[in-house]
């Protein structure tokens, strides 16, 4: 991605560059601090279950407009309620995904489980959503936040993000800038998300039942997952946590007389999916059978199959239409507020509207990003690559994708610290994506718990299209809140 030289640059947290000797010393300390405090991941290039690398991070916190941060935080309970209502609207999900499931095998498999569960009736009425709504500031609207996506499955980095605030606090103190700390908002994402799981465990009301984490065959983002597990075990020592793959569940799992999920003789109260969101997690029919077994069980799922489908890009594209929001939100002011965070999202279905979108994308591809129904990063097509990608698709295949207006975020400047990178790090142009976590628990008729649960900031090189940390494309960060009178350095 090229960077427009006219893009505004937000004022830095501290004056840069740092003197080289000071930069080398504080970066070395920060790397060790990250490893010793769990801001770490397993290496994908030289994997060992016995070693960790620090997770890529930004040395000092990146600036983010306070007004927009507070707006995102305030909106999260409304977003939670919106997604809960969407997940429980069978007609909307079925109609919205009708064309997508014809061409996207993965979404079709998920939808098939949904259809079968619906046919027999949901064994467990309650669901828990641990959501994350992601935003970029848009410079053409005064850096107003625009939603990039909403994650309803495996919403990651709540654990590490909580610890990254402490890391950057340490760095600022080392650099003699403790006065900056009040502008870094507290972040209790780990506690907020884990307490949500425990609230669901309480609803299940079986003191001996366990919480089950569904994990990948190899967990690179191990610290983030373990932080959740260890927080639960340390804060609620009476609750046991199991970690199993989908393959393990197929081998060990069965339903009891009341459809309770039993694993190795233990009853499961809550299932927390950190895997199952991409095709590679399902090696065979066995893993799909395991997913179906869990969905038909009495355990409270995070997410349940309907929540998983509610997080597809196709559903998000449908929600960006004002008339559709009115179906799920009653308050006109809330509809207006949510509508403002949506950027242009367009269908590519084989109909008049979809064909018009197709032609628009071919004419001005630099204005858009092309998105499939996938989570996990690295799947999108940007700008001038879009026409070739679209021309390779049949009219039917296009309905598995959506087109989205490209958001133009402001720049920040800083030091990105990555394992194996040259020392000292150099100042680079960056853009930051804010994620706000939310917890919502309820059934089709009532929401019992609904709250905002902390935040994360992912920062990437301004020239990079994708910014996933787990995918190796971005770095972890925290927001340094700035007010409108000091936003522009240009």
Image: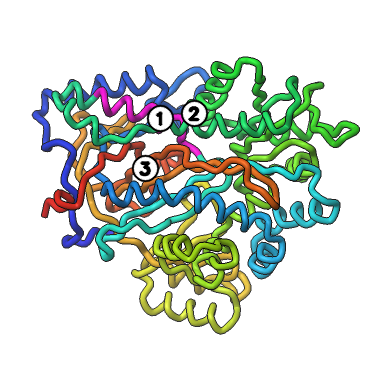
User: Is 278 on the left-hand or right-hand side of 68?
Assistant: right
Is residue 15 inside the magenta stretch? no
Q: Secondary structure at mark 3?
A: strand
Taking the spot 44% from the left edge, 22% from the top edge, the residue there is 52
Residue indicated by mark 1? 162
Q: Earlier in the sequence, mark 2 or mark 3?
A: 2
Q: Nearer the viewer, residue 140 or 372?
A: 140
Would you say the residues marked 1 and 2 are in contact, meaning their CB atoms lie under 8 Å apart?
Answer: yes
Residue 463 percent coordinates (x, y): 28, 53
Q: CA distance from mark 1 to mark 2?
A: 9 Å
Residue 320 percent coordinates (x, y): 49, 66
Q: CA distance from mark 2 to mark 3?
A: 20 Å
Residue indicated by mark 3? 458
Q: Quadrant of the N terminus?
A: bottom left
**Main secondary structure found in the magenta portion:** helix
Q: Earlier in the sequence, mark 3 or mark 1?
A: 1
Residue indicated by mark 2? 191
User: Which stretch appears magenta?
Assistant: 156-170
Residue 327 percent coordinates (x, y): 59, 66
């Amino acid at each position: 991605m090229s960077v427009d030289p006219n893009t505004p640059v937000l004022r830095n947290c501290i004056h840069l560059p740092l003197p080289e000797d000071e930069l080398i010393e504080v970066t070395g300390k920060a790397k060790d601090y990250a490893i010793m405090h769990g801001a770490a991941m397993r290496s994908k290039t030289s994997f060992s279950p016995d070693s960790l690398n620090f997770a890529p991070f930004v040395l000092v916190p990146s600036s983010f407009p306070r007004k927009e941060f507070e707006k995102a935080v305030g909106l999260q309970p409304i977003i939670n309620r919106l997604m809960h209502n969407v997940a429980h609207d069978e007609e909307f999900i079925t109609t919205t995904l009708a064309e997508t499931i014809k061409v996207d095998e993965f979404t079709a498999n998920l939808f098939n489980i949904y259809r079968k569960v619906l046919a027999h009736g949901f064994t467990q009425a309650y669901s828990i959503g641990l959501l994350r709504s992601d935003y970029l500031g848009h410079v053409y609207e005064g850096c107003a936040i625009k939603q990039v996506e909403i994650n309803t499955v495996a919403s990651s980095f709540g654990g590490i993000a909580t610890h990254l605030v402490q890391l950057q606090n340490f760095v600022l103190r080392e650099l003699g800038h403790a006065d900056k700390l009040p502008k870094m908002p507290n972040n209790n994402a780990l506690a907020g998300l884990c307490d949500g799981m425990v609230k669901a465990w309480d609803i299940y009301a079986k003191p001996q039942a366990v919480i089950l984490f569904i994990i990948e065959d190899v967990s690179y983002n191990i610290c983030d997952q373990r932080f959740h597990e260890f927080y639960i075990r340390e804060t609620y020592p009476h609750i046991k946590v199991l970690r199993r793959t989908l393959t393990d569940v197929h081998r060990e799992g069965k339903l009891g007389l009341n459809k309770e999920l039993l694993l190795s003789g233990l009853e499961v109260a809550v299932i927390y999916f950190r895997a199952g969101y991409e095709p590679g997690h399902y090696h065979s029919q066995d893993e799909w059978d395991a997913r179906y077994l869990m969905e038909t069980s009495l355990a409270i799922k995070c997410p349940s199959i309907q929540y998983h489908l509610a997080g597809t890009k196709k559903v998000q594209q449908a929600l960006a239409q004002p008339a559709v929001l009115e179906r799920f939100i009653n308050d006109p002011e809330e509809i207006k507020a949510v509508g403002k965070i949506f950027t242009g999202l367009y269908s590519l279905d084989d109909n008049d509207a979809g064909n018009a979108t197709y032609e628009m994308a071919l004419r001005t591809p630099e204005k858009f990003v092309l998105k499939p129904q996938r989570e996990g990063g690295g799947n999108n097509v940007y700008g001038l690559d879009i026409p070739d990608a679209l021309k390779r698709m049949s009219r039917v295949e296009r309905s598995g994708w959506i087109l989205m207006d490209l958001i133009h975020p402001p720049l920040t400047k800083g030091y990105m610290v990555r394992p194996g990178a040259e020392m000292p790090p150099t100042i680079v142009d960056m853009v930051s994506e804010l994620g706000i976590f939310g917890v919502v628990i309820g059934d089709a008729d009532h929401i019992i718990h609904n709250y905002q649960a902390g935040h994360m900031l992912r920062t990437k090189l301004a020239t990079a299209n994708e910014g996933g940390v787990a995918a190796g494309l971005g770095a972890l960060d925290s927001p340094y809140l700035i007010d409108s009178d000091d936003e522009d350095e240009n």
